[in-house]
Image: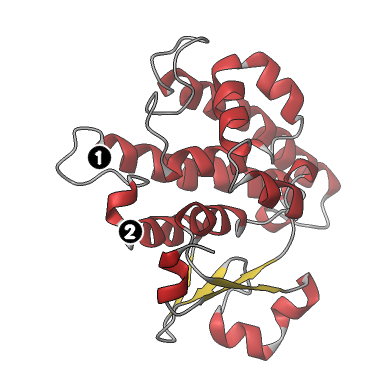
Amino acid sequence: MGERAEMMAAYRLYWSERTGAFAPAAVMAELELPCEAVRIEKAAREEAAYRALNPMGQIPTLVLPDGRVMSESAAIVLYMAQQVPDSGLVPKASEAIHPLFLRWLFFCQCNLYETVLRFAYPARYTDGDDVAAVADVRSAAAARMDALWDIVAAAIGDGSDSGPPYFFAARFTVLDIYIAMLSAWHPDPPALLRRLPVLARLVGATVARPAIAPLWRTYHMHAGPA
């Protein structure tokens, strides 16, 4: 553990496999921030103790060292990276890429993440007893997901398949982590990455990073959203 982790009180991250807790965990690993990882199964998310922390019963939930509570994966990764501003994981407001970084991080959260949920849990978005309606929601989500990935891929780097791999070329940011996480929840990740080589390079470079590779395995990110 690095000097930074030794000097700070621990954060507490509630997580489970194949959830949005992966991105916060990966950011904290990159930054060497101390984190107590508390695994919580799906049934326990409905219990009063957890609902007191996160009324939605969702993952992730992050408890800060002073006891304040955060939820929403994009908010958490943005906050955590800002705790170590010189890390470069979040562009500073003075940098030209800062507005683009914000645009695409929240594009991914508001559009891709939501569409993943519609695919994974279609009954939440229609009459759950109507089999045809549930199938229609899921089918529409799958089509929309591919369209959204086309938009993201077109914005990555310089658009080539041979340049630096990250969204902002050689500059690695939390956006790369977020995109890699979401790509794992596509209905057919290998097919997605074959179709979009520029995305495949971003994901490959991100999940191969020494701090992130073990978490990718721990979170079973290849298996889709939980």
Q: Does the CB distance between marks 2 and 1 fall below 8 Å?
A: no
User: How far apart are labels 2 and 1 at the CA level?
Assistant: 16 Å
In this view, the residue farthest toward the front is 3
- The amino acid sitting under disc 2 is Val
- For this rendering, which residue is in front, 27 or 112? 27
SS at circle 1 = helix
Q: Residue at x 44, y 45 (%)?
A: 174
**Which disc is residue 193 wearing?**
none
Horizontal arrangement in the rendering, residue 133 relative to residue 69 (left or right)? right
Q: Residue 43 at what x, y percent from top left?
A: 79, 76
Residue occupied by mark 1: 98
Say which residue appears at 32% left-offset and 43% top-offset. 102
Q: Label 2 belongs to which residue?
A: 84
Say which amino acid is labelled 1.
Answer: His
Comes first in the chain, label 2 or label 1: 2
> Tag 2, which secondary structure?
loop
- Which image quarter: residue 99? top left
Name the quadrant of the C terminus. Answer: bottom right
